[in-house]
Image (spheres, rainbow, N blue to C red):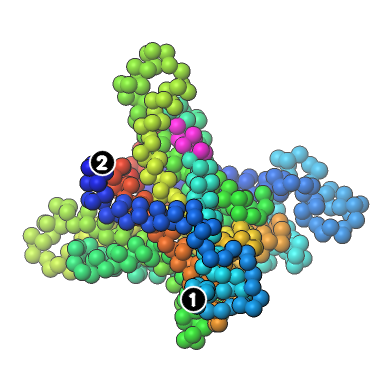
Amino acid sequence: MSDLAYIFKKNRYLRVGTIMVMILLFIALFADFLAPFAFDEANREARLEGPSADHWFGTDEFGRDVLSRVIFGSRIALRVAVLGVSIQVLIGVTLGLISGYFAGVTDQVVSFLADLTWSLPPIIMSMAVITIIGKGLDNTIIAISIVSWAQYTRVVRAKTSSLKNMAFVETALAYNEGHPSILFRYILPNTIPSIIVLVSLSIPNTIMSTTALSFLGLGAQPPSPDWGLALSSSILYLMNAPWLAIFPGMALVYTVFAFNLLGEGLRDLLDPRLRAR
Amino acid sequence: MLAYTIRRLLQGILLIIAVSILVFSMLHLMPGDPVELITDRKVPPDVKAEMKRQFGLDLPLYQQYLRWVKNIFRGDFGISIRSKTPVASTFRHRIPVTLKLTGTALLVEFLVGVPLGLWAAYKKDSRFDRAVISTSLLFAALPSFWVAVMLIMIFGVHLKLLPLSGFSSAKHYVLPVLSIALGGIAGMLRMTKSEVLDVLNERFVFTAYAKGLDKRTVLVKHVLYNSIILILVMMFLSLPWIISGAVIIENIFVIPGMGGLLTQAIINQDMFVVQGCVLIISILTVLSNILADLLIAALDPRIRVSMSGGGN
C-alpha cells in the first residue's frame, strides 16, 4: 500500500489523471442522481435560457437542461472508450501476437495491413466504413476502431518477437506446449503493461474521433445527449446562446485531458521506453 | 539512393493498389444491389437492367475492378447521383482548395511549433519553458472542431473581425487554419523540444561552443539543422491527422473542398463521389508520405543506409 502511495506521490500525471478519470466515472455512474433533469426532458417555456439557478448550464433550443445533457453525455464518452478500445485491442493484439510469433509471410501481410491503416487519414477511412455499415453511434465506434488498431499490433509484435527467443518460452516449447498455450499463457501476460499504456493513450483519440463524426452528423443521432452532436447544433445559436457550445466542449476537453494525463502517467510508470516511439 | 527510391515507390504503389481495391469493393460490400445504390428509386426495372449492363455490373468482379481502374486513369470517376454531373469535374475545383488548406496548416504548424520548441529547449526549466509546455498539453486536448466553434464565436460573431464561412480571400484562411493547426503546433513544439534536447548533448555541440561560436549560431546552424530531419519525419507522419482535421473543419466553415463534399456524399449516399473522395485523399496522402521519405533520405545519409539495408 505504501508503494502505491509513493508512486502516486512521485508521478504527478498519474495522480491528477487518476483523480480526473475517477470523477468522470463517478458522474457517468450516478448520472441519474446527479442530473437535475432527464436528458430528453423538453420544456417549451424555457427555450435557449442562459445559465441560472434552475439550469446551471442554461437550456437548449428545445428547452432541455444543458447540464443534465452534459452529465448523461459522459456515459456516451465512456461507452465509446470501452467499446472502441475493446475492438482495437482485440484486433490489434491478436494480429500483433500472431505476426510477431510466426514471422514470415503472416508477419509481412499483417505489417502491410498495419502500415495501410496507419498511413491513411483515420477519419476518411472510418467515413468509408460508415458508408458501408451505415450511420449511428455504435457503427461509428466500430468504424473508428477497425481502422485504428495499428499501434497495438506494432508494439505487441515487437514485444512478441523478442519474447519468443527467451529461455522461458524455449523451455515451454521443450515441454511440448502448443503454440496457442505459449502465446496466451507465456507471451501475452508479458505484453500486458504495454497494452495498458496503449489503451489509456488511445482512449482520448477514440473519443475525439467518434465525437468528431457525431459532430458531422454521422455518429450519434438526436435526441442523444452526445457532446459532438450538441456542439454541431450549437453553431446555429452561437450569437444568442454561447453556453450551448461552451459546456459540452469543456466536458469533452476535460475527458480527453483526463485520459491524456492518465496515459502519460501510466507510460512513465509501466513502460518508459514506449516514449521513444 | 536509387535503390531506396525504387523500393519506396514500389511500397507506395502497393499501398495505392490496396486502397483502390478497398474503395472499389465498397459498392459491393454494401447491403443491396449496386444498381440500386447508384440510381434513383424511381428508375424502372428495365432501365436498371440496362444500366447494369452498361456499367458492367454483370461482369466478374476482377473484370469490373480493371474496368473501374481504367476509367479512373482516364479521369472518369462516374456521375454524381445527386448533381447529375461528372464527379471528376467537381474534384477539379475541390482538390486545390483542400491542398491549400492542409498545406497552409502544415506550414503554420512548422513555422510556429519549431521555433517555440527550440526556444523551450534552449531555456529548459525556465518560466517560458514551463508555460509553453503546459499550454501545449492543454491545446493537445482541444478538439479542432470545438476550437473552430469557439473561434467563430469570438472572432466572427462577437468581434466581427473575420469571415465565418467561404474560402475566397486570405482573411478566410485565418480561422480554419488556426483551428486545424492549434493542436498540431502543440505536438510539433513538444517534439522539437525533446529532439533538440537530445542534440544539445551531442559532442559536436560542445565542439562548436569550443570553437568560440556564439550561442545563436550553435543553436540554429548546428542543433536545429541536426534535429530538423526527425522533425520533418514527424511532421509528415502527422499528415493523416491534419487531413482528418481539415475534413472536419471544411464542414464547419463551409469551405468548398474535398471534406465537405465527402461528408455530404455520405449523408446523401452518393456512392461515386464517396469512392472518388476516399481514393483521391488516400492517394494524395500516400504520395506526400513517399515524397517526405525521399526528401528525408536525401537530407540524411544514415536513414538511406538503414532503410535500404537488410529487411525491415
Q: Name the residue under label 2.
A: A1
Question: Which one is in front, B154 or B121?
Answer: B154
**Chain of the residue on which disc 1 is drawn:** A
Under circle 2, the secondary element is loop
Question: Is residue A272 at all visible to an observer of this figure?
Answer: no
Q: Which residue lies furthest to the bottom in this view?
A: B160
- Which mark, by number, is residue A53? 1
Q: How crowded is mark 1: few (under 14 residues within 10 Å), some or many (20 or more)?
A: few
Nearest-to-viewer mark from 1 and 2: 1
Instruction: Evaluate whether residue A180 shows in this view.
Output: yes
Residue B275's image quarter? Answer: bottom right
Q: Is residue B124 magenta?
A: no
Q: Residue B188, position in %: x, y? A: 35, 61
- Position of residue B243 relative to residue A149, above or below, is below
Measuring 68% from the left and 66% from the top, which residue is drawn there? B89
- Towards the viewer: B45 or A51: A51
Label number found at residue A22: none
Image quarter hosting the C terminus of chain B: top left
Q: What residue type is labelled 1?
A: Ala
**Secondary structure found at label 1:** loop
User: Is A161 positioned to the left or the right of B257 in the image?
Assistant: left
Q: Which residue is at 12% across, 57% downward?
A: B206
User: x%, y% of residue A264?
Assistant: 33, 52
Chain ID of residue with mark 2? A
Assign the magenta stretch its main secondary structure: helix
Same chain assignment for discs 1 and 2: yes
